[in-house]
Image (cartoon, rainbow, N blue to C red):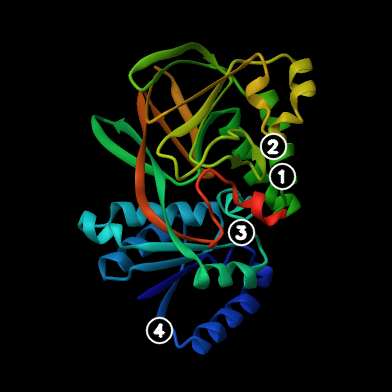
Amino acid sequence: MLAIIINPKSGKKAMRAQRIYLWKLLRARHQPFTYRVTKYANHALELARELVEKGYDQILVLGGDGTLSEAINGIMRANITPEQRSKIQFGLMPRGTGNDFARFWGLNKHFKRSLQLFFDGKVQPIDVGCLTYWRNGVEHHRYFINSIGFGIDSLTNVYGQQLKYYLGSHHINYTLGFFIALIKLKDQLMQLFVDGKPFIKGKMFHLNIANGPYNGGGMKQNADADPRDGILHGMFLERPTLWQICSGFSNLFNGGLYKLPFVHPFSGKDFIVRTREHTLLEADGIQLDFMGDFEINCVHNALNMVVPKYCEPGKEIHDFLKK
């Protein structure tokens, strides 16, 4: 039973033609389906939860990282048994600005190819990250499929989103947003524990914990992150000098950030962050904020994704596409 969740604001200029093509493809394959269109923030979360609770076990998302993240949260929060959740498969036809999680799998805005990969691909168990935080003593959970960022990462996302209104949806928005955030950001005192052991304590310029290697529209922050390996990868950055930023900027895109002296890389399954300050963060490009401590955990093999058949453990899909 296939259900399709469509964000009409993602890649809206071409969405009508792509939807017509998808309907024709489904009819040619004699594939029964239903579809829902998002209308407001977090609507994909509500729709995905409703659909899987009704018994739909295939979810295809037409949208960007944020739409996919909402759908993942809906599936993870649905009132279904673990056995039912283990049978759910999801796929992605990327239509956003960054499409960072899609990038790892070799998916892009060439929609015909993305759809072909969905219908002819294989099922791959993947990990999901879980953020736990508290408001007024009440425990809350937010799941993320790609990465979660604090400090410069979150503020870059804020300004990158705002620039869409002036420049349209382009990758350059996040690069420009990064330089604006450099001027505005104030460091935050944090203590980080990795798998129960103290890792670092100090003023945080940037903290990112990732399930996939890309974020910010193609920046390769955590080059070793793989959503199939059962762990999350991250980095804690102390504030660099202007010279260090300029000389190390290219490392944002080539996976070499961990080589820089102000970068502290780490990996593990469970993380605790202690802070007394107000925290602004982005989870898959969706902004959140709260006060106090929080935890982040890797939920191994949480969901099944339909991926290209040539996907192999430990190999990034781009490695195959270049051959």
Residue 78 in percent (x, y) is at 27, 57
- Upstream in the sequence, badge 1 or badge 4? 4
Label 4, on which residue? 32
- Left/right placement of residue 53 relative to residue 295 reads left
User: Mark 3: which secondary structure?
Assistant: loop
Q: Amino acid at mark 2?
A: Gly
From mark 1 to mark 4, how far is it between C-alphas?
A: 39 Å
Label 1, on which residue? 173
Q: Amino acid at mark 1?
A: Asn
Q: Tell me, yes or no, whether the two marked residues, 1 and 4, touch with CB atoms within 8 Å.
A: no
Residue 42 seen in render? no
Q: Amino acid at mark 4?
A: Pro
Residue at 66% from the left image edge and 42% from the top image edge? 160
User: Mark 2: which secondary structure?
Assistant: helix
- Upstream in the sequence, badge 3 or badge 2? 3
Residue at 47% from the left image edge and 12% from the top image edge? 200
Count of numbered badges drawn on the protein: 4
Label 2, on which residue? 177
Label 3, on which residue? 107
